[in-house]
Structure formats: C-alpha cells, structure tokens
Image (cartoon, coloured by chain):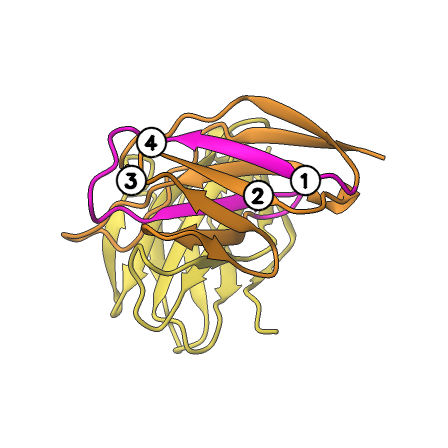
Amino acid sequence: EPEVTQTPSHQVTQMGQEVILRCVPISNHLYFYWYRQILGQKVEFLVSFYNNEISEKSEIFDDQFSVERPDGSNFTLKIRSTKLEDSAMYFCASSGTSGGPTYEQYFGPGTRLTVT
Amino acid sequence: DAKTTQPNSMESNEEEPVHLPCNHSTISGTDYIHWYRQLPSQGPEYVIHGLTSNVNNRMASLAIAEDRKSSTLILHRATLRDAAVYYCILPLAGGTSYGKLTFGQGTILTVHP
C-alpha cells in the first residue's frame, strides 16, 4: 500500500540554524500539506501546496518557513532560522488526484524537530 | 471551518462496539464530515468521510443524522489497537482552500482488555 515517508525521523538543531524536513508524498497525489504538533498540543495546519505554489498558509507559516517541491517527488519544509518554539513533530500529508475537502489526506510518520 | 464538538474521552471494552459522537450544528450543505484518528506517537490516520448518506469501510462506519447536525463514528468491534484520539473534522470547502484540516482536541478512546 502506498505511503507517505518522511526523513529524518528525528532532527536536533541549534537555535538559529536552518533545517530542511523532507517528505515523499504518494506518487500520484497532487495536494501536499505540512502540519505540526507541539508536544501535548493539537495538530496544527501550516501550509498547503498545489500546482507548484502555496494555496493556503496559517499564521504560523511566517517568512522563516518555506516549502518546495524540487524534483517532482520530494516535498520539503525549510525553516531558515530555528527558534526554541519550533520544537515539535512535523507531519507531511498528501491528498488524492483531485484533492480538496472531499478526499482523504494521508499522513507521514512525522519528523521530530528538537531545537536546543 | 465549521465547528465540531466531541466528548473529551470515552471508554470501551475490547470486542465491543464503540459509538463516537460528534456535533456540528453549523454545518453547511457542502461540508463533508471527515474522521481521523491518531494512535500514540504516530501521525494522524484517515478513518472515513461522508456527506449525507451513511458510509462503511473496512475500518468503521459513519452514521450521519438526517439534518446533518451530528454524526457518529462506529467501530464495530473495538480492539486494543483502536485506542487513539479520534477527530471529527469538517474541512473548509471552496475558494482557495484545498482541504486544510483543523484538528480540535478530539475524543480520547480507551479500550480495556
């Protein structure tokens, strides 16, 4: 069964450093998402991406964040200058061939980001 | 997104049916009702979704009230592996929204052996 994969599973970085979290969505999916979950809190939407551009982003997704689909298979989230409060589990998700709210999203296992 | 209300927690015994309720009184005619769950230390997992009619799949059933202001996720025989947080979500439809999911607190389901 196809699945979303994410690397690395755990990333430790120092405050102020840049990190890139990588995701490989399901191959024929067209809609891509990043969510995050701070320990003990709700899952929060960060950004959605379709047709090589951001379709929607939350208030959390400020200028420090960017997303890219560099090669048609990977989908990346970059944080330019990490802060302590960026420590969280980051989940990538992808959605079906037509996308939108009628289609289910498939989530990856997550990358745990720890900023020290 | 339309607001949903779920109980904070529910308990069940293994191999018994579980009915997880969700209220969504402000639902609009085009809102789909989605259910996801999150097992401990894992990412969210799609369970089921529907619009008006009741739906069944290999994981669960979704019963939707006639006025669509509430729905119930039914796990026919709970297993220990079903212990998770269950989320009822109405993704925003239309405009520039491409199915953003807004997770609430969900219902923590505990399954006893």
Q: Amino acid at mark 1?
A: Pro
> Across the whole image, how many numbered discs are drawn on residues?
4
Tag nearer the camera, 4 or 2: 2
Dot 3: chain letter:
A
Q: How far across and how far down the image is residue A5, in percent?
A: 58, 64
Both on one chain, marks 3 and 1?
Answer: no
Q: Which residue is mark 1?
A: B17
- Check if mark 4's residue and mark 1's residue have beta carbons within 8 Å: no
- Check if mark 1's residue and mark 2's residue have beta carbons within 8 Å: yes
Residue shown at 31% from the left, 64% from the top? A99
Q: Which residue is mark 3?
A: A58
Query: Within the magenta stretch, is there residue B38?
Result: yes
Q: Residues within 10 Å of mark 3 (few under 14, many from 20)?
A: few
- Check if mark 3's residue and mark 2's residue have beta carbons within 8 Å: no
Both on one chain, marks 1 and 2?
Answer: yes
Residue extent of the magenta highlight: B15-43
- Distance of mark 1 from mark 2, alpha carbons? 7 Å
Q: Is residue A12 visible?
A: no
- In this view, the residue farthest toward the left is B95
- Distance of mark 4 from mark 1, alpha carbons? 23 Å
